[in-house]
Amino acid sequence: MKLFDFNKYFPDETACRKVFKEMRDREGVTCQHCGSHDVVWLESKQQYQCKHCRHRTTLRSGTVMHGSKLPFMYWFIAMHLLTATKKSISAAELQRQLGHKRYQPIWEMMHKLRSVMGKRDDKYTLKGNIELDEGFFSTETPDAQKQEKLKAGAGSQKNIFRLIQPFNRL
């Protein structure tokens, strides 16, 4: 999504909150007290209430935003900037862009988002043909090559062996 599209879909705090609530409703909300999935939204309190034990749950509760007082808009902007570009954005730069006074809450938000993104990556394994832009892969050399003393550096025999090895199998 381009920045202009992002601004069209999420122009203000109310729009971000509405979209987030719709996502929570689709996923299903679980009562943290009794584990029931039977909850109702209290518009006046902006919270979910369990129909069984009447325990209330905030919109952020049980999500990556749990315990944060930062606006939903900050979270959505941070998620967009973290996922829209190849290069990451620093917490200091995000703080500057948002015009937020304190660094600590922005750093904590970025840390939480990066942590959740890393955990999500662990759930999936790559299969089939994979195309990469850039990458460095280490390979093990056969035992015969390990016994010889190889020089170090970019032009070493070890690196040349890695390049030639796939062609030897043809």
Image (cartoon, grey):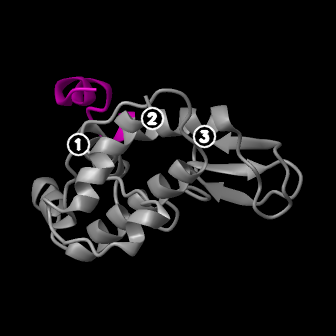
Q: Is residue 82 above or below residue 103?
A: above
- Residue 46 counted in the magenta span: no
The magenta-colored residue range is: 1-15
Quadrant position of residue 108: bottom left
Prevalent SS, magenta region:
helix
Instruction: Give the number of the mark in front: 3 or 2.
Output: 2
Instruction: Give the number of the mark in front: 3 or 1.
Output: 1
How packed mark 3 is, by other alpha carbons closer than 10 Å (few <14, some 14-19, many 20 or more), is: some
Quadrant position of residue 41: top right
Q: Would residue 73 be found to the left or right of residue 160 on screen?
A: right
Badge 1 element: loop
Task: Point out the image quarter for the N terminus.
Answer: top left
Residue 93 spot, x, y in % from top left: 12, 60
Q: Report which residue position mark 1 lands on.
A: 86
Q: Nearer the viewer, residue 89 or 122?
A: 122
Q: Report which residue position mark 2 lands on.
A: 169
Q: Is residue 147 above or below residue 70?
A: below
Q: Residue furthest right?
A: 52
Badge 2 element: loop
Q: Earlier in the sequence, mark 1 or mark 2?
A: 1
Residue 43 spot, x, y in % from top left: 59, 41
Badge 3 element: helix
How packed mark 1 is, by other alpha carbons closer than 10 Å (few <14, some 14-19, many 20 or more), is: few
Q: Earlier in the sequence, mark 3 or mark 2?
A: 3
Q: Earlier in the sequence, mark 3 or mark 1?
A: 3
Identify the residue at image location x=45%, y=52%.
117
Identify the residue at image location x=34%, y=46%.
79
Q: Report which residue position mark 3 lands on.
A: 24
